[in-house]
Image: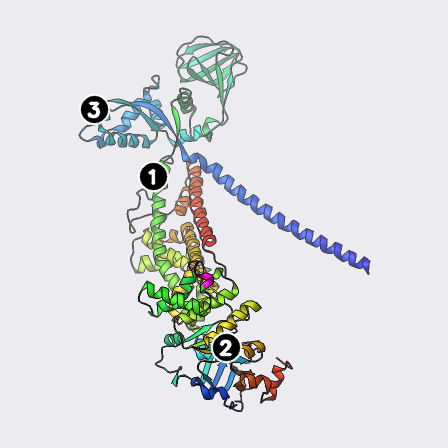
Amino acid sequence: MDMMPQAVVTPPSPRIMAERQVRIEARDVNIFYGEKHAIKNLSIAIPDRAVSSFIGPSGCGKSTFLRAINRMNDTIPTCRMTGDITLDGNSIYDRDLDVVQLRAKIGMVFQKPNPFPKSIYENVAYGPRIHGISNSKTELDEIVEKSLKRAGLWEEVKDRLNHPGTGLSGGQQQRLCIASAIAVSPEVILMDEPCSALDPIATARIEELIDELKQNYCIVIVTHSMQQAARVSQLTAFFHLGILVEFGDTDEMFTAPQEKRTQDYITGRFG
Amino acid sequence: MTEVRKGLIAKRYATERRFRIYGATALALTALFIVFLLADIVIKGLPAFTEPRVKLDVTGAADKVDAAKPAAGDYEAIVREALRARFPTVSGRAERRKLNGLLSQGAADDLRRMVVADPALIGKTFPFAALLSDDADLFYKGRQTGVALTKGATSLQFAESGEAYVITGDVAGLSPGQIVLVNEGALRITGIANGAAQAEALARPVTLNPAAAGGWNIMTLAKPEADRRISDQEIIWLEELKSEGVVEKAFATRFFTSGDSREPELAGLRGALVGSLLTVLVALALSIPLGVAAAIYLEEFAAKNRLTDIIEVNINNLAAVPSIIFGLLGLAMFLSFFGLPRSAPLVGGLVLALLVLPTIIIAARAALKAVPPSIKEAALGVGASHQQAVFHHVLPLALPGILTGIILGLARAFGETAPLLMIGMVAFIVDIPKGFESAATVLPVQIFLWSDLPEIAFQSKTAAAIMVLLAVLFSLNAVAIYLRRRFERRW
């Protein structure tokens, strides 16, 4: 395993960054799983109110970096990190920072829809309840309704809020998970291949939803599908072997990539 | 080529068929063993659930029972008198003692309870069902000797000669040891000489009238008198009681309501059941919180390092330690070092808690591990802390599995014998245990104790106690299976 740090990739400043402020910034991030060097000297700035997608072949480190943004990697005992990631200029790896508060600010949607084996209502209400966001039942009802509406699920489930969340279809479950994430009013939503377990129609619904959500949130999405990245994101980052190869405006990236490796991946020469 | 292939196919078929036969044979043999075991226990044990009683008219005579102190009355004498009234011909100390021996000591106690509960009975004559002794019980259940009755085919004449009797006529069919039932009496043949039979009276005939063919009976007892615990004399009495229709077979509630006893017909399981209950309560009260907490901590919170590895390996090892070792530990630690009382459910429970702790920890950890990590991630993703994720989501989902483990641990604790022998729960204890520190025994140890006793009647008591133990264990397992089915979730 090559332990030598790679040359620092300084991504060209994307055009879109000029219009938006930076929400998340990573500087010289290295992540190790035991001996494996999963992310090498990564620096990136992710803007607010836009969708940034991470693409790259399997094992390139895109999910690892995504999980570093809300410190999900803390749950893996062998995982180490150096460098720093900031949210609005404040380090998220600060000693005094409460990781639970952080995760409430940076919500996450997972690859496989993972609703709790509880009712639809309880699924959405769980986050607000543990964070004490609502004071009363009516307030909680409002949050649940608002979140489900935003996730585009309200019309389908409003008559069966007491039914188990696990009884919904895969696409509905994923939207339920998005609703649960929204319910705690996060600022950032991380999505780890949210459509990989879904059929094309359900995927289309989620993509529509992502498009709407970007009005209010900073969204980072990891995807295997380059078409999806092209469809939903304004910015695309290409990862390869733990290195951030290129980061730029999606339309430029897919038409005129700067790097040969990006070109090769996008045109399907490897990956 | 095709020939080779055909051969291969035939060979594969043969192998598969052979394997099916092995499997079916193994299954059939297992089933056979189980059926054999259960049938043996049930056949032996069922008689212990009934007891014979003789319906007597007893008189609560004022000279034997003081109305002011009914509990102190001489009820033994009252019951004996009532029985003797049924056999007016019985005379002599030895005979009367034998007759009294048909009754259980429990009969007087039953009568005492009855009169104490209803003092208005004093001075009156009232019906009472007196418990018979274990020997009588065994005789009625056919466990003492086979009894064959045949009609006499010839005519006989009878004459008295001193205490003995002489039977003349066609006595060719008779042999010594047989009993001739005639004229409401019973004559046992002692010898035959010169066409006449000498006989002694087990019950004196009312008259000496000659009997025609069909007018008398021969009773043949399969087992010689010397080889059984009940004499011919007693058999005649018991047969007479039976033929008069005063013997009733009742459900032996005292098997469940009384403690241990040296008299088989009085021995019951209540002491052992209460002892088991108290012991298992202590064991569970300790091992559930300790085991579940240890499992949650080890599975969800403990750092994965050398120390936790060692602890984990040792918990698994602990589950494989022979149970008698735990008994020795209990003896050395709880009795010798801490000076806790011997034979007490408290100590038994402590020892059993140690014994089932690994079972519960292993089952609980397996149940926690079986909860998919995505559930925990989902909780963490919406900002639950690690502890909240575990207690709000992982633990409730693991609970059915944990519960199953607890019930299996409970079943193990309930059936455990060896460690309790070491801490003195093997004593003969008549009293029902009153608390966690009073002397007690438990169900499996009670079985062990009874199986060791020489009285035949205890054999069926032992089998019956095994039936009770198995019933408890089977129902515990049924509850475990039900819980697993009921709360099983699919993800």
Name the residue: 38% across, 22% down. Answer: B246
User: Would you place residue A49 above or below residue A109 in this image?
Assistant: below
Q: Residues within 10 Å of mark 1 (few under 14, many from 20)?
A: some
Residue B89 percent across, percent down from the top left: 35, 16
Please give the chain letter of the residue carrying mark 3.
B
Q: Residue B431, can we see it?
A: yes
Q: Which mark is residue B257?
A: 1
The residue under label 1 is which amino acid type? Thr
Give the amino acid at mark 2. Ile
**Of tags 2 and 1, which is closer to the observer?**
2
| In this view, B440 is above or below A154 | above
x and y, in percent, of residue B306 in the image = 44, 74
Parent chain of label 2: A
Residue A68 image offset from top left, x and y in percent: 46, 79
Residue A270 coordinates in the image, percent (x, y): 63, 81
**Magenta residue span:** A155-164
